Amino acid sequence: MAATAADEAEMKSIEEQPQHQKPLDNPDVVDRRPKKNKYALLCALLASTNSILLGYDIGVMSGAVLFIKEDLKITSVQVEILVGILNVFSLIGSLAAGKTSDLVGRRYTIVLAAATFLIGALLMGLAPSFPVLLLGRIIAGIGVGYSLMIAPLYTAELSPAMSRGLLTSLPEVFIVLGILLGYIINYTFSTLPRHLNWRLMLGIAAIPAIAIGFGVTAMPESPRWLVMKGRVADAKRVLTKVSGSEEEAKFRLDEITKAAGFDSAANADWHGQGVWRELILHPSRPVRRILVAAIGINFFMQASGNDAVIYYCPEVFRAAGITNKRQLFGVNVIMGIAKAAFVVISALYLDRFGRRPLLLLGSTGMALSLSVLGLSSTFLEHSTSKPIWAIVLSIVAVCAFVSCFSIGLGPITWVYSTEIFPLKLRAQGAGLAISVNRLVSGVVSMTFLTISKKITFGGMFFLLAGIMVLGTAFFYFFLPETKNKSLEEIQALFEDKGESDGGGGTEMRET
């Protein structure tokens, strides 16, 4: 696609601006006080609704699998495969989403994600046998992978720096709302006939997928992707709508074009080529540090066992002594409410307190909660009377665990993964990091019950607590604070000392 005359004129006006322009936090240039932009919020909400698909699946599958096991007469190993296969195949969607979004744009990648999940949901709801159900999970997993990568990426590229934490954490808010919705659907449909209830639980996910596909029509394209394609005039129009003022829009456009290393002829034909060479084969030192940070936070997000604990929570509490299915689903609803409340609190205060404080607070709380859960589970496993206080302690510990996850790792992983990569590496870099997220989630989900049978649930929770201690240390030493910085300013945080003030910025911009 060739650059238009309007694009060339826009670039000329940018090039003619004084090079000694004052920094963004100077009130004489741009007022960086937080300004609510309803259009940016609407776009972030629409993009983030894609994430409700994963949340719903996690929540509803925790209950549906109890009925599937009885109706289709499948083994515990088949249950693990059925639960984990979605997460394993979602890594394919995450990897493909980076290249796809560079090629066709962020908006149409969101549509593709919803369409893929729609097909999977219909297959699951109509599945007459275990193989067909498994196929539906595989297809839905690919759609989930697309959703998890593209929603926070699109939101991060659209959002002003002062509200990016809030807006980019919205995907996690919708994941949690989806989990809560899944729990409520489980509770509501649990009294229906066994051959019908789980099919309705899984198939009803097609409804939000359809709504999301149509909702995307109201969203603009990412201004950073538009600049990458040489469509500067279109990017300016979008930035004007999502910024607090005309001056802020102009400054953001200037930053983006400089970070992109803009060349109208070359950028018009750019579709993500050369990224893997600079990302994996020959990364610079700053890019290598970014990769370590992005992959590390995604690894620990799922190595914490969060998805597995939610998927198998009914199994854990059944072992603790709660055998009635309605009571099990009621406990799940309580856990979902706690998780939803704390993710909203985190999203609202993420831009005020910063990423690091909430991340360290949440991961420390997760380690402590898992330790308490390990102690209570171990006591219950060796007790014949199953005392109420121990069961209540287990429920409180699980609620504390998911709440601490929602304060820190839950929302901040998506924020961090999409804001630290340089512009040309962002889509495929975030896709790589999130694919690690999905792979680890799948492995943990597919081995959780097997390992727990070997070392008991108590032993499993102690193991996860140890992993979170290591995760907390990793976050402390390798993840710098990114609060209130533009996506372009964040790059300097990973450069060698002194580089950002001298020639070091070139190394990052070349990527």
Image (spheres, rainbow, N blue to C red):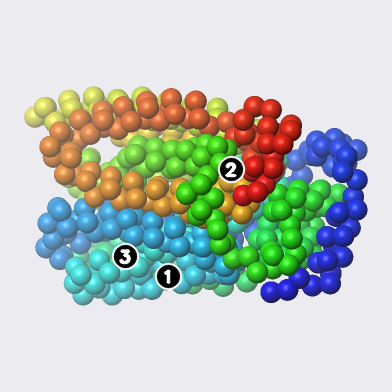
Q: Secondary structure at mark 2?
A: loop
Rate crowding at label 1 as few (under 14), some (14 to 19) or many (20 or more) other CA atoms within 10 Å: many
The amino acid marked with disc number 2 is: Ile
Evaluate if marks 2 and 1 touch, with contact meaning CB atoms under 8 Å apart. no
Looking at the image, is 287 positioned above or below residue 187? above
Evaluate if marks 1 and 3 touch, with contact meaning CB atoms under 8 Å apart. no
Residue 303 image point, x, y percent: 34, 39
Give whichever of discs 1 and 3 has the lower sequence position.
1
Answer with left or right where residue 135 lies relative to residue 270. left
Q: Between 399 and 362, which is closer to the camera in this rendering?
A: 362
From where the camera sits, is residue 212 visible?
A: no
Answer with left or right where residue 399 lies relative to residue 391. right
Per the model, the C-alpha gap separating discs 2 and 3 is 30 Å
Residue named by callout 1: 116
Residue 420 marker? 2
The amino acid marked with disc number 3 is: Ile
Give whichever of discs 2 and 1 has the lower sequence position.
1
Residue 138 marker? 3
The amino acid marked with disc number 1 is: Thr
Per the model, the C-alpha gap separating discs 1 and 3 is 10 Å
Rate crowding at label 3 as few (under 14), some (14 to 19) or many (20 or more) other CA atoms within 10 Å: many
Q: Between 474 and 503, which is closer to the camera in this rendering?
A: 503
Per the model, the C-alpha gap separating discs 2 and 1 is 28 Å
Answer with left or right where residue 491 lies relative to residue 239. left
